[in-house]
Amino acid sequence: MDNIGITTISSKGQIVIPFGMRKNMQEGDKMIIIQSGDKMIIKKAKDFEKNVEEDLEFAKRTEEALKRYEQGDFKKMEFDSFIEEMGKW
């Protein structure tokens, strides 16, 4: 996992993509939002066909992990161990 950010939806339904996640984006870029249930994936329109199935699988795994976390089914580990574990995904 490369990056995680938190943002807020404005009263107009707008969201701000955190600065560190906008490295390869420019004003005017067209974005596609893919929704599956309560999961959303944002991709550049020009990259839409690249790895769509992989994106949906990532969203599914993220939701499953959140459910396990909310149920208290998680463990503490050092950062390096966590990154190593994430590499197995």
Image: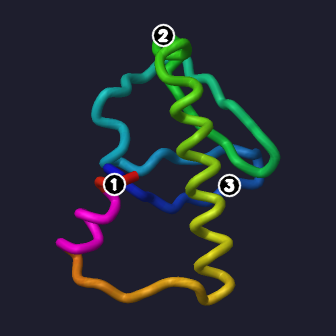
Q: Position of residue 64 (x, y in %)?
A: 64, 62
Q: Which numbered circle lies on residue 26?
A: none
Amino acid residing under circle 1: Lys
**1 or 2: mark nearer the eye:** 1
8 sits to left or right of 16: right
Q: Position of residue 47 (x, y in %)?
A: 47, 15
Is 34 located above or below residue 78 in the figure?
A: above
Question: What residue is shown at x 43% (from left), y 23% (from top)?
Answer: 27
First along the sequence among labels 1 and 3: 3
First along the sequence among labels 1 and 2: 2
User: Which stretch did the figure color magenta?
Assistant: 80-86
Q: Which numbered circle lies on residue 88?
A: 1
Q: Position of residue 54 (x, y in %)?
A: 52, 32
**1 or 3: mark nearer the eye:** 1
Whether the residues at callouts 1 and 2 have beta carbons within 8 Å, the answer is no
Say which residue label 3 marks.
9
Is 52 located above or below residue 18 in the figure?
A: above
Question: What residue is shown at x 64% (from left), y 49% (from top)?
Answer: 60
Q: Is 70 or 19 nearer to us in this picture? A: 70
Q: Is 23 or 69 nearer to us in this picture? A: 69
Amino acid residing under circle 3: Ile
In reply to whether residue 83 is colored magenta, the answer given is yes
For disc 2, the neighbor class at 10 Å (few under 14, some 14 to 19, many from 20) is few
Mark 3 falls on what kind of element? loop
Say which residue label 2 marks.
46
In three-dimensional space, the C-alpha distance between marks 1 and 2, rounded to whole angstroms, equals: 29 Å
Question: What residue is shown at x 22% (from left), y 74% (from top)?
Answer: 81
Mark 2 falls on what kind of element? helix
Amino acid residing under circle 2: Lys
In three-dimensional space, the C-alpha distance between marks 1 and 3, rounded to whole angstroms, equals: 33 Å
